[in-house]
Image: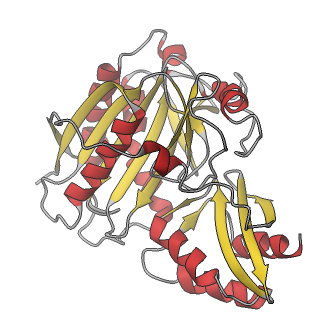
């Protein structure tokens, strides 16, 4: 029998309620093994929103700034626009392989995006848009970026696959949003131009309402992954501390050493302190995609680690060897140690 997923469509949603909704939905699916467990949520956020990945450091200062609201999503990856003119997608499942197999680790981390992006590709095809997934974290049309994807796997193994699809605006607005919301340049991002990006409106020739995008996404996931959908409405959520979540990862004066290295998705930064020849504390930041327990464990286990390359490599290898742990978008695991070692000598 095919999986039956709930469908939730939420136009003009507040950023705080969107975050709260995904947190509630993740709680609902944890540990579920039946075929009636999972949610596809399609929404758009009101206003101009700059979305930080889970592991970016938040810039100091108020939000909104320059009319742009800073918003930290649950998944990692690069900074991107996520407000007016964009459609957000959340696919919440009991584990990362739930639509494929009962074994949670049946899909490798590298396969998770490849598999779950397929519904978006089919939705585009249904709209006459020849979308392509070239790998990593983007969906393209004729080599122009249309959408960016990411995912989180929480401590209980539940999956949140996230995507932002350019609808009436495109990702070339990112540099302007960063200039207004982060004038100090805390968040690093590549400079995209109109030639690098596209939108559904540009490709289809007209604006698509969020409800229309949701209908095509449902058909796309039905065709590509063999699921079914039943519409669902949510009751108002409990309050969510959006600012506390945003500021949970911010610059710290006690971490006086810093280095960054270029990666597949952008940059990986290490902010750390050195004490008596050992790492006193460390925060990893940047554009990588990971299961949050792996990042928490890595930062924890690096505290007190000898400030030597071999010891750092051993900690990284030990954490990533644990079943379920992954860090994508940085290339070889040695890249993590590269950033930390550079920070130690900076």
In the depicted view, which residue is nearer to us: 32 or 181? 181
Residue at image x 40%, y 62%? 153
Q: Is residue 32 above or below residue 322?
A: above
- Residue 66 lies, in percent from the top left, at 65, 23
Work out which residue is located at the far right of the displayed protein and give it: 346
Residue at image x 28%, y 73%? 103
Q: Is residue 248 left or right of residue 182?
A: left
Is residue 323 in view?
A: yes
Q: Is residue 248 above or below residue 342?
A: above
Is residue 139 in view?
A: no
Which quarter of the rendering shows the C terminus? Answer: bottom right
In the depicted view, which residue is nearer to us: 145 or 289? 289
Q: Which quadrant of the structure image shows residue 334?
A: bottom right
Which quarter of the rendering shows the N terminus? Answer: bottom left
Q: Is residue 40 left or right of residue 235?
A: right
Q: Is residue 92 above or below residue 174?
A: below
- Residue 22 lies, in percent from the top left, at 32, 47
């Amino acid at each position: 029998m095919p999986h039956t997923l709930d469908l939730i469509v939420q136009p003009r949603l507040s950023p705080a309620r969107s975050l709260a909704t995904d947190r509630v939905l993740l709680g609902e699916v944890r540990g579920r093994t039946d075929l009636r467990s999972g949610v596809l949520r399609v929404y758009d956020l009101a206003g101009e929103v700059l979305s930080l990945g889970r592991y970016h450091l938040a810039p100091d200062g108020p939000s909104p700034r320059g009319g742009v609201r800073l918003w930290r999503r649950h998944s990692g990856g690069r900074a991107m626009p996520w407000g007016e003119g964009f459609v957000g997608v959340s696919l919440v499942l009991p584990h990362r392989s739930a639509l494929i197999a009962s074994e949670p680790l049946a899909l490798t981390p590298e396969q998770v995006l490849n598999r779950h992006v397929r519904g978006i590709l089919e939705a585009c095809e249904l709209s006459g848009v020849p979308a392509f997934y070239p790998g990593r974290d983007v969906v393209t049309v004729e080599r122009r970026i249309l959408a960016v994807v990411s995912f989180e796997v929480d401590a209980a193994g539940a999956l949140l696959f996230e995507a932002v699809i350019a609808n009436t605006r495109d990702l070339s607005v990112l540099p302007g949003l960063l200039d207004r919301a982060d004038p100090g340049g805390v968040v690093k991002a590549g400079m995209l131009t109109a030639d690098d990006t596209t939108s559904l409106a540009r490709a289809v020739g007209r604006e698509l309402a969020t409800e229309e995008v949701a209908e095509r996404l449902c058909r796309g996931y039905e065709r590509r992954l063999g699921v079914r959908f039943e519409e669902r409405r949510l009751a108002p959520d409990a309050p969510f501390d959006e600012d506390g979540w945003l500021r949970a990862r911010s610059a710290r004066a006690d971490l006086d050493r810093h280095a960054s290295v270029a990666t597949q998705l952008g940059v990986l930064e290490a902010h750390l302190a050195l004490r008596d020849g050992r790492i006193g504390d460390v925060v990893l930041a940047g554009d990588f995609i990971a299961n949050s327990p792996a990042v928490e464990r890595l930062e924890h286990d690096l505290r007190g680690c000898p400030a030597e390359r071999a010891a750092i490599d051993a900690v990284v290898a030990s954490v990533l060897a644990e079943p379920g742990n992954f860090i994508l978008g940085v290339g070889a695991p040695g890249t993590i140690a590269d950033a930390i070692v550079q920070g130690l000598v900076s």
